[in-house]
Amino acid sequence: MTPKPKGQSKYDDPNSGYTNVDRSFMEQRAKRRYVEAQTYLVRKIPVLGIPLLEKLPPKQSYKVQAMATDGTCIIYNPEWVVQQPLLELVHVIAHEVAHVAFKHMTRRKGRCQKLWNVATDYQVNSYLDLMGVGQMPKDCLYDVKYNGMLMSSDAIYNDLLENSKPDPKGEDPDKDEEEQEAKQGDGDSDDSSEGGQDTPEDTRLEKEMEIAASYGWVEDYDGSDPEAFGDADDEDNPTVSITPADIEQLEAEIEEAIAHGEFAHNKISGDQPPVSINGVLEPANIEVVDWEDALQEFLTEKVKTFKNWNRPHKKWLQQGFWLPSKGSYGLKDIVIMNDESGSMNEEENQACLTNIDELNQQGLVTFDRVVLMHFTTSVSHIEYFEPGDDLIYKRHSSGGTCFDTVFKKAKELEDDSLIDPSCYIVMTDMYDWFPPEPDHPVLWMSVTKPEVLYANDLIPNYGKITHLQI
């Protein structure tokens, strides 16, 4: 639920002396101020400004403290807007657009909403600081520890969670709202840390949650009418049931707008390195997320979309701009490389295959084949599965581990036109040196805990890592 303002609006206070005319005048000032900041973003930072203009119409509301978004619009408190310096307002609007670009409104997946907002704020503010967007307000969540270009919101959330406790209102940071309500109703909430005293880390986290609530909030996308956003507690605005297809549609529209923004941004950036939101979404060596979420995201987003320059976007073409539309295609061969050195059991190996099969049956992932390569220091066996086949894992070898051998074998099969890879998924304990980066996206599904990987320098400089834990 979007945090509400702490106090009553002075325009709602009958003793304040303000009239409806005063309110209307203030709202018009806020609208002009917002448009001024929006225009600045479109001209100076189009990678964020164009998605803002295309997909996030503004809406005024006194039911938020500052700003909030659910991925369909940006809602702002006009009283707050008129009080902000222009460059700080630019920063906060960009903050909301970045929440949407990183898909924070669809990726919470039942985690504590307040802590999720803290984590995503750290990522977004670092990203905006590194991009040089506007002027960061004095009181916002920023820590050099959380590099927004490298560290995902999931990884930041997990780091914060390790140092958290149930907050003073009884909300366990890693439980969803329904669980919280049930827990509070039973009177079982634990309001204190060990010893009955708040630690400095507890106090800091509570303060961080307050800051996130008073700045730029991200709300879950629930399919409600954008005009009713912010009124979720009203009986006249019931929550709409949404499907994975609805979420996929929203994300596809956002990706298309981001493609337009990236193109325009790179046109004005001269000799500067090209900007890519997807480059931030797919860090090489830091992101460690829930393996099922990581697998689905990897297969449905990272290797499934592209910018179609042959089919220009109709809206922008009418205005004289040749910007790409977003295209999509089914995956060709999903190449799974199973490390059979003995560190992975049959259940772990089968889990990945079962998950891919379920994604295919749900229509979220389409592919030509799954190519299963069993390897140790050599490739001992290769299996080919087509859609509808039973994806059953059977061990075929045992021994050491050599990534270079299986990567070279995959390249050899591709050169001989025996496979047509869309991506590599490597299921392993990570105990080997890493070969040069291949021509295809790589997902490392590691059974070794992240802290052990870092301690032993077992982090590759490419691909995405997730911890496979059954």
Image: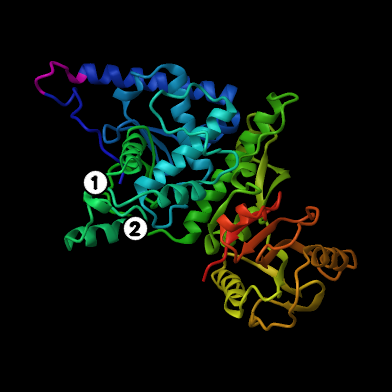
Residue identified by numbered label 2 = 175
Residues in magenta?
14-20
Q: Judge from the rendering whether residue 6 lies leftward or rightward of residue 463; answer left or right.
A: left
Residue identified by numbered label 1 = 197
Q: Residue at x 44, y 38 (%)?
A: 121
Could you classify mark 2 by the number of other residues whose Cα lies within 10 Å: few (under 14), some (14-19), or many (20 or more)?
Answer: some
**Earlier sequence position, callout 1 versus callout 2:** 2
Q: Disc 2 on helix, strand or loop?
A: loop
Image location (x, y in percent) of residue 408: 85, 64
**Location of residue 217 by image quarter:** top left
Please state which of residues 233 and 145 is positioned toward the viewer in this rendering: 145
Q: Is residue 442 covered in magenta?
A: no
Q: CA distance from mark 1 to mark 2?
A: 22 Å
Please say if 306 is above or below 176. above
| Residue 55 appears in view | no
Q: Residue at x 47, y 56 (%)?
A: 246
Which SS type dominates the magenta stretch?
loop
**Location of residue 5 by image quarter:** top left
**Location of residue 421 by image quarter:** bottom right
